[in-house]
Image: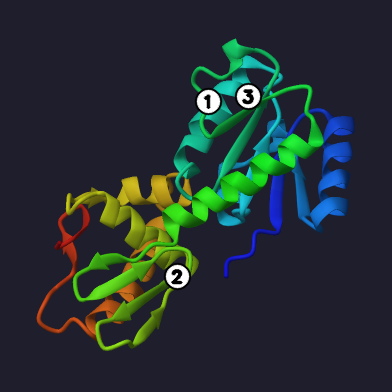
Amino acid sequence: MVSFKNITIISDDIEFVEALGGLLEDSLNFNIKKVNSESLQTKDLIDNLSEIIIVDSFSSILNKVFLTELLSRIVGLVPIIYLYHSDNEVNDTVGSKLPKPIYFPKLLIRIKKEMKDFVINKNREIEIGPYSFNYLMKRLVTKAGSEIRLTEMETKILNFLYESNGKLIRRDTLLTEVWGYKSEVMTHTLETHIYRLRKKISANCISQNLLVSEPGGYRLDL
């Protein structure tokens, strides 16, 4: 069973985030990470992805544009709840929306619902070649029942390639969508993850080159 215990709260309001974080820690023993939106770094958020993210209403247009673009990259990887003051704030935001002021029992209900819906959506078996792929469990299972464990990044890469329906995905696109930022330095790291993922896949997929490398990028031969 997947256990959701780690919550990141993004807010510029120190008093609000301290009060909300305390309530969440006391109610269901959540582990709370508090982040100021002005100091938020794309790489840090994605490398240390929580199991659910709560975003307080944006304090500036600049933060709104930045966070909206950033959170859109991870909306499929983690449940996001956006707390807002007025309806005009939520037109281009991602994730679930909840108006302020917050009624705490209602927030708890929403958190539990988002977690449940996320598990139902992600904890399903997807057929990829000779495997059943489970995103949340980070594993591939052969038809004979053998299990292949995947790392967090291998899981994200495989999931993104699967959702691309066999299209060639450029290396810089994978860096942006999986890691959340572009960097020439990261190209070697991406290639290392691809190499290890392909090695795991090919062990039970000798007759089929499932993870294909082509000039400029990668794709799944579905």
Rate crowding at label 1 as few (under 14), some (14 to 19) or many (20 or more) other CA atoms within 10 Å: some
Mark carried by residue 68: none
Q: Is residue 153 above or below residue 208?
A: above
Which is more foreground, mark 1 or mark 3? 1
Q: Taking the image as drawn, is residue 185 in sight?
A: no
Disc 3 designates what residue?
63
Residue at the spot 25% in from the left edge and 66% down from the top edge: 127
User: Amino acid type of disc 1?
Assistant: Thr
Q: Who comes first in sequence, dot 3 or dot 2?
A: 3
Which is more foreground, mark 3 or mark 2? 2
The N terminus appears in which quarter of the rendering? bottom right
| Disc 1, SS | loop
Residue at the spot 51% in from the left edge and 31% down from the top edge: 94
Q: Taking the image as drawn, is residue 163 in sight?
A: yes
Q: Is residue 126 above or below residue 203?
A: above
User: Amino acid type of disc 2?
Assistant: Lys
Residue at the spot 73% in from the left edge and 43% down from the top edge: 108
Disc 1 designates what residue?
93
Residue at the spot 43% in from the left edge and 74% down from the top edge: 150
The C terminus appears in which quarter of the rendering? bottom left
Front position in the image: 124 or 85: 124
Front position in the image: 176 or 12: 12
User: Amino acid type of disc 3?
Assistant: Asn
Q: Is residue 129 above or below residue 179?
A: below
Disc 2 designates what residue?
138
190 on left or right of 19: left
Q: CA distance from mark 1 to mark 2?
A: 28 Å
Residue 30, horizontal then vertical, whole percent: 77, 56
Q: How is the image coloured?
A: rainbow
Residue 114, horizontal then vertical, whole percent: 58, 45
